[in-house]
C-alpha cells in the first residue's frame, strides 16, 4: 500500500486545465505524500492529507520539493469550471517543519486573497479558527500551471501530535445548518415556519417562511393557488408600461410598486436597451448602420426569439451584460487611478533627478576647490617654519607676497578660517580697483564705503550687490533648489560657489577684527546664505513694485 501511495504521489500531474481536473473523482483520504526517490515506510515529516469529511475538498496532492507541495482543488459537482473551496487536514508532521502549499488550480481571476485575506487554520490542541498572517500569503498567475491563478502560503508546524486543518474561510456545514434550523423550530415562533420542500440524495430541502402571523395565510394562498405572471423585457412591454397586468386584487401586496409616470420608465428602459445594443455590437462585430433606430437593430438580432411571447432579450442575458459593463467601468476607473499615481511618481522622480544633477555639479566644484586649497596649504606650510597657524598671532605671520596673493585667490571654502590680517593690507589696490581674490575686482570707493557699514546683514547684502549686481541676483538663488512654499515654484540657477566663498572670507576678515571667539565667528558666518536670500527677495519685491507703478502710470495716461 505504501508503494502504491508513493507511485501515486510521483505520477501526479502538474497541469491544472479543465481537462485535467476531470480526472479528480473524489477527495483524498489519508493520502501519504512521499518524495520521488524514497521507498519504504513513511517517516515523521511525510505529510498525510485527508479531505474525506463534511465540507472537505482536496482532490490531489503533488510533491514538488521537501518543503513545497502542489494542491489541486476538486471542482464543483457537475461543473468542473468552478474551483474555489478547499478544506483539508494534515498530520504526521515534525516539530518546526516549514512547508509551502500551492493551490494551483483556482478558477477565480479576482479574489480577496489579493486584498489581504488569508486562509484559516486550526489544530486539535487549538480548536479555534485563526487566520494565517497575510504576509505569508500570495495570490498570482503562474505560467508553470497553464497561467492559472495560484494561491501560495507558508506555514510552520509547531506540534508533532497535532492534526492541522486548513480551509478557504470559516466552514459552515450542512449538519450545522440543520441543527440551527431544528433549534429555531423547537422555539415555536409565530413568524417562523419550516416545511419540507423535497429531498436531494437523502438530504432535506427546507422551505423557510418568515412573516407576520396575520399574513401567513394570505401568503400561502397567493403563492400556492395563484399563478404570478413574471413580466418579460420586450419592446412591446415598454410601450405598454402604463397598462395594468393581470395580477388580481388579492395579491396586490406581492407586486413590485410600479412607477406612476410611464414616460420615465419607458425612457429608462430605452436607455438600457441602447446600452445592450452597443454592447452586442462591440462584442459580436455586428453592423447596425442599415437600421434606423436601436430598437429595430435589436429586433433584427432576436428574430428567432420574437415568436416566443415577444421576448426580445432574456432577463438573465440583460443582467449579465449589465454586470459585465459595470465591471469593465470599475476596471477602467482602477486603471485611470493607477496611471495618475504612476504619473505623479514620475514627476517626483524627475524633480529628484534634477536636484541630484545640481548637487553633483556643485560637489565637483567643491572637490576642485578643496584640492586647490590643499595645494595652497601645502605650499604655505612648506615655505615657512613648521608651526601651528591657529596658535600664532596675526602679527607674527609674514608670508611671502606671492604665496599670500595665491592664498587670497584660492581660499574659497567656509570650513577653513584663515588667520585674521588687516583688511587693507590683505587686498590688492590697483587702478582704483580692489582685488578680493579669484579674479573678482570691485570699485575702491565703494569698497571703502562698505568698510564703514554697520551690521553683518547690511555688509553682506551690499557686498553681494557689488560682486554680482542686482540684474544677476534677481534671477538666481543661493542653493538652486525651488522653494517649498509654492507648489509650482521653478528652481533658479544657483550662485557661484567660489564667489560665495569670497563673501564669507570678506565677512570673516571683518568679524576677526572685532572678536577672536571661534564659536561666535562660526555662528555669524552661518547666516551668510540667509542674508543673501533676503537681498534677493528685496530685489524681486522692488522689481514687482516698479512694474506696478509703471502699469498704474500707463493706465493714468
Image (tube, rainbow, N blue to C red):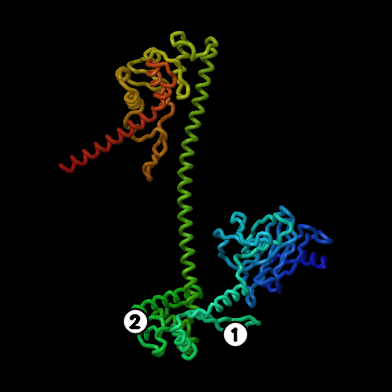
Residue placed furthest toward the front: 187
**Quarter of the image holding residue 137?**
bottom right
Q: Nearer the viewer, mark 2 or mark 1?
A: 1
Residue depicted at 36% across the width and 79% down the height: 265
**Crowding near the residue tagged with mark 1, few <14, some 14–19, many ≥20 C-alpha atoms within 10 Å:** few
Residue 556 versus residue 294 in the image, above or below? above
Mark 2 / mark 1, whichever is N-terminal: 1
SS type, badge 2: helix
Q: Is residue 142 visible?
A: no
Query: How packed is label 2: few (under 14 Cα within 10 Å), some, or many (20 or more)?
Result: some
Horizontal and vertical percent position of residue 474: 33, 34
Quadrant assignment, res 267:
bottom left
Q: Is residue 369 above or below residue 205?
A: above
Quarter of the image that includes the C terminus: top left
Q: Nearer the viewer, residue 232 or 59?
A: 59
> Callout 1: helix, strand or loop?
strand
Above or below, 217 against 339 in this view is below
Q: How many marks?
A: 2
The reply to whether dot 2 and dot 1 touch (C-beta < 8 Å) is no
Q: Nearer the viewer, residue 339 or 98?
A: 98
Question: Disc 2 versus disc 1: distance between alpha carbons?
Answer: 42 Å
**Residue 271: x percent and y percent?**
39, 75
Rendered location of residue 409, percent (x, y): 44, 20
* Residue under the point 60% across and 76% down: 178
Give the numbered dot on residue 262.
2
Q: Which residue is depicted at the point 32% across and 32% down?
A: 471
Q: Nearer the viewer, residue 400 or 40?
A: 40
Q: Nearer the viewer, residue 109 or 188?
A: 188
**Drawn side of residue 391 relative to residue 122, left or right:** left
On residue 198, which mark appears? 1
Amino acid at each position: 500500500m505504501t508503494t502504491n501511495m508513493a507511485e501515486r504521489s510521483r505520477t501526479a500531474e502538474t497541469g491544472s486545465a479543465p481537462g485535467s481536473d476531470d480526472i479528480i473523482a473524489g477527495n483524498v483520504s489519508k493520502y501519504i505524500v512521499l518524495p520521488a526517490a524514497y521507498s519504504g515506510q513513511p517517516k515523521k515529516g511525510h505529510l498525510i492529507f485527508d479531505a474525506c469529511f463534511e465540507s472537505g475538498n482536496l482532490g490531489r496532492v503533488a510533491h514538488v520539493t521537501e518543503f513545497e507541495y502542489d494542491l489541486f482543488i476538486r471542482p464543483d459537482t457537475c461543473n468542473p469550471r468552478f474551483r474555489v473551496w478547499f478544506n483539508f487536514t494534515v498530520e504526521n508532521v515534525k516539530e518546526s517543519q516549514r512547508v509551502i502549499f500551492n493551490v494551483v488550480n483556482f478558477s477565480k481571476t479576482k479574489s480577496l486573497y489579493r486584498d489581504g485575506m488569508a486562509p484559516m487554520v486550526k489544530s486539535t490542541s487549538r480548536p479555534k479558527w485563526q487566520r494565517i498572517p497575510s504576509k505569508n500569503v500570495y495570490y498570482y498567475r503562474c505560467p508553470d500551471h497553464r497561467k492559472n491563478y495560484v494561491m501560495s502560503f507558508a506555514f510552520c508546524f509547531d506540534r508533532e501530535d497535532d492534526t492541522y486543518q486548513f480551509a478557504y474561510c470559516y466552514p459552515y456545514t450542512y449538519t450545522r445548518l440543520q441543527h440551527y434550523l431544528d433549534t429555531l423550530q423547537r422555539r415555536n415562533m409565530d413568524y417562523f415556519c419550516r416545511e419540507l420542500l423535497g429531498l436531494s440524495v437523502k438530504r432535506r430541502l427546507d422551505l423557510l417562511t418568515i412573516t407576520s402571523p396575520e399574513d401567513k395565510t394570505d401568503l400561502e394562498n397567493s403563492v400556492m393557488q395563484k399563478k404570478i405572471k413574471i413580466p418579460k423585457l420586450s419592446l412591446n412591454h415598454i410601450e405598454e408600461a402604463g397598462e395594468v397586468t393581470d395580477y388580481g386584487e388579492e395579491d396586490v401586496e406581492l407586486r413590485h410598486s410600479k412607477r406612476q409616470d410611464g414616460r420615465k420608465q419607458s425612457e429608462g428602459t430605452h436607455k438600457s436597451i441602447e446600452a445592450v445594443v452597443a454592447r452586442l455590437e462591440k462584442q459580436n462585430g455586428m453592423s447596425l448602420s442599415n437600421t434606423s433606430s436601436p430598437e429595430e437593430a435589436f429586433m433584427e438580432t432576436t428574430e428567432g426569439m420574437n415568436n416566443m411571447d415577444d421576448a426580445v432579450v432574456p432577463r438573465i442575458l440583460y443582467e449579465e451584460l449589465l454586470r459585465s459593463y459595470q465591471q469593465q467601468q470599475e476596471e477602467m476607473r482602477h486603471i485611470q487611478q493607477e496611471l495618475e499615481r504612476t504619473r505623479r511618481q514620475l514627476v517626483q522622480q524627475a524633480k529628484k533627478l534634477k536636484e541630484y544633477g545640481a548637487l553633483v555639479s556643485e560637489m565637483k566644484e567643491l572637490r576642485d576647490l578643496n584640492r586647490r586649497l590643499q595645494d595652497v596649504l601645502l605650499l604655505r606650510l612648506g615655505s615657512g617654519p613648521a608651526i601651528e597657524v591657529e596658535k600664532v598671532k596675526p602679527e607674527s605671520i609674514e608670508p611671502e607676497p606671492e604665496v599670500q596673493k595665491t592664498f587670497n585667490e584660492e581660499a574659497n571654502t567656509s570650513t577653513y578660517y584663515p588667520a585674521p590680517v588687516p583688511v587693507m593690507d590683505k587686498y590688492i589696490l590697483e587702478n582704483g580697483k580692489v582685488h578680493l581674490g579669484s579674479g573678482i575686482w570691485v570699485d575702491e570707493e565703494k569698497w571703502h564705503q562698505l568698510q564703514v557699514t554697520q551690521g553683518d546683514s547690511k555688509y553682506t547684502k551690499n557686498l553681494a550687490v557689488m560682486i554680482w549686481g542686482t540684474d544677476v541676483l534677481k534671477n538666481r538663488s543661493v542653493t538652486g533648489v525651488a522653494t517649498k512654499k509654492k507648489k509650482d515654484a521653478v528652481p533658479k540657477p544657483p550662485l557661484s560657489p567660489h564667489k560665495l566663498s569670497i563673501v564669507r572670507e570678506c565677512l570673516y576678515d571683518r568679524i576677526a577684527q572685532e572678536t577672536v571667539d571661534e564659536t561666535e565667528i562660526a555662528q555669524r558666518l552661518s547666516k551668510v546664505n540667509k542674508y543673501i536670500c533676503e537681498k534677493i527677495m528685496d530685489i524681486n519685491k522692488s522689481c514687482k513694485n516698479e512694474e506696478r507703478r509703471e502699469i498704474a502710470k500707463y493706465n493714468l495716461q
